[in-house]
Amino acid sequence: MKTKSVASLIAGTGLLIATAPAFAVTIDGVTFPTTSGPHTFAGTITENTVTTPGQELTGDGLITTVDGSTDFCSTSGCQLTYEFGGFNLEEITFPEDADDNTGNARFSGGYVNFYVNGDRENPWLTTEADIERGSEYTLEGFLTNGGTDQAQNTAVGLLSVTGGSAASIFDNDSYENGAGGLSDLLFNTSLSPSGDMEFTGSADAHYVSSPSEVPEPSDLSLLGLGLALIGFGAAYRRRQNG
């Protein structure tokens, strides 16, 4: 996996923007830009700890900005939240020759769904994880230990829209995936330990309205295409303790 930061990689592909939408559509009280080009929505994230193959990675979060603006809900008290799950841990590896306290984890399956005011009966957007390029896995995460027993982790991944009232906004085939098809969203996370069996941090998602061209495969291969590496401080401690 490349050692460039996730932020620099995303910036390098032209995905980071912070401008108010000139054209937008409001669905279920939530307004998103539809101007041609890349867009970003971001917020908080909380995730569980997984350390053993077969465990499921789950979590949730709150969207707080759309293209850098907090004014995306048309009604007072409106909230756009999301949850994810179904990411099954397949393996964890800590290379013996690693001298910078790094590790990797690989997952299969997965989904990320969005809701307005927690209404799970009527999802705003539903997605499923796509496999990464050159791999049989849907997720591959990356952690750095930083010289302590608390793991920091960053990851990115691709998602395809499967439904929801706002599906038409995001079903744009914006990014090539490892299955030879096209994905709609790029999802990025950055987390730190926040307590017993829990990690918190920030997350953001990117999409392209009316994409004029699909990013080259080489651009996406740099991203590593992992969504989450959660709570591997415990695994790292066990390795350090022999």
Image (cartoon, rainbow, N blue to C red):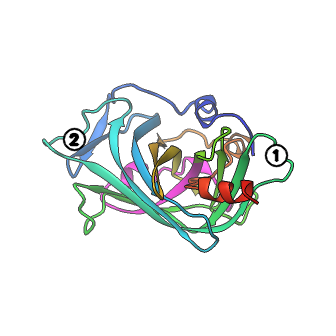
210 in magenta: no
173 in magenta: yes
Taking the image as shown, residue 123 lies to the left or right of residue 143, namely left
1 vs 2, front mark = 1
Camera sees residue 112: no
Which percent across, then down, holds residue 91?
A: 70, 66
Identify which amino acid the numbered label 2 is placed on. Cys
Instruction: Name the residue: 44% across, 35% down.
Output: 36
> Pointer 2: what residue?
73
Determine the residue located farthest toward the right in the rendered image.
97
Which is more N-terminal, label 2 or label 1?
2
**For residue 98, which numbered disc appears in the image?**
1
- Depth check, front residue: 78 or 195: 195
- Depth check, front residue: 239 or 134: 239
Q: Determine whether the residue tagged by mark 1 lies in a helix, strand or loop.
A: loop
In the rendered view, tell whether residue 224 sits above or below residue 24. below
In the rendered view, tell whether residue 38 sits above or below residue 98. above
- Depth check, front residue: 230 or 127: 230
Q: Determine whether the residue tagged by mark 2 lies in a helix, strand or loop.
A: loop
In the rendered view, tell whether residue 175 sits above or below residue 17. below
Which percent across, then down, holds residue 240?
A: 73, 53
Range of residues picked out in magenta: 156-179
Measure how far apart labels 1 and 2 are at the Cα level.
Answer: 46 Å
Identify which amino acid the numbered label 1 is placed on. Ala
Instruction: Indicate the quadrant containing the C terminus: top left, top right, bottom left or bottom right.
Output: bottom right
Taking the image as shown, residue 109 lies to the left or right of residue 216, namely left
- The total of numbered circles placed on residues is 2
Determine the residue located farthest toward the front in the rendered image.
241
